[in-house]
Amino acid sequence: MLELNFNPFPVISTNRLVLRRIEKKDVNDIFFLRSDESVMKYIDRPRARSLDDAQLFINKIDDLIEGNNGIMWAVTMKNDPKLIGNICYWNIEKEHYRAETGYVLHPDFHGKGLMGEALLAVIDYGFKIMNLHSISANVNPENAASIRLLERNNFIREAYFRENYYYDGKFLDSIIFCRVNSKKDGS
């Protein structure tokens, strides 16, 4: 069984980014990401309607981290601590050494390769530190940018589920992608 410990919180640095813990001071940036129509276009969840909703989201993330049941990093530029996105592991199946990743990025930072850089660092952390065997991603089939990001990072399409998710009065499709840790078995 997978044993996780996110204390102390793992800060990850890349060439251009620092992935750090989301803090209360990030509430305005979280509110923007969770309420903006363009950011949330393919995330079929209720939008944040207030700063209180954003704070409740931060509290939920803190509870997941403290219980070692999930982790979310604030994505920041190395020269600026302002949150520009987030990336996480959640839906962790400890008995199967598997976790789902998810991510969002402020539209001003799209098209610069930043989420690819963050994803590579989080994949490395997941396989080397968390000891994951596989990482999944659940994607809206219309989210071409996310699909390209996953495919560029060696995720393979595992399944296409038709109308498996009900949100906002509609049944929606999902694509499941997966990347397996090929280094674990010595190959």
Image (cartoon, rainbow, N blue to C red):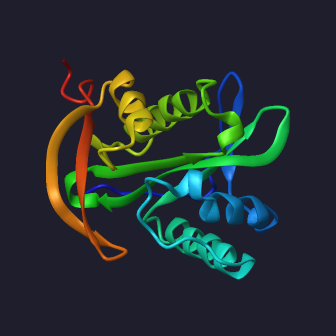
Q: Position of residue 166 (x, y in %)?
A: 27, 72
Quadrant containing the N terminus is: bottom left
Q: Residue at x 41, y 46 (%)?
A: 130
Quadrant hosting residue 91: bottom left
**Camera sees residue 133:** no
- Residue at the image point whose x is 33% and y is 26% from the top: 151
Residue at position x 35%, y 34% in the image: 147
| Front one among 145 and 169 | 169
Asked if residue 127 can be seen in this view, the reply is: yes
Residue nearest the observer in this picture, 67 or 39: 39
Q: Residue furthest top?
A: 187
Q: Is residue 163 above or below residue 115?
A: below
Is 47 displayed left or right of 44 in the figure?
right
In the displayed structure, does residue 33 sit left or right of residue 168?
right
The tally of labels here is 0
Image coordinates for residue 144, horizontal then vertical, percent: 38, 35
Q: Locate residue 61 relative to residue 24 in the image: left or right.
A: left
Q: Is residue 23 above or below residue 186?
A: below
Quadrant position of the C terminus in the picture? top left
Quarter of the view holding residue 70: bottom left
Judge from the rendering whether residue 67 lies leftward or rightward of residue 117; answer left or right: left
Across and down, in percent, residue 15 comes to 68, 21
- For image coordinates 78% across by 64% down, the residue present is 28
Query: Seen from this angle, which residue lies furthest front?
Result: 169
Furthest residue in direction right, as rendered: 79
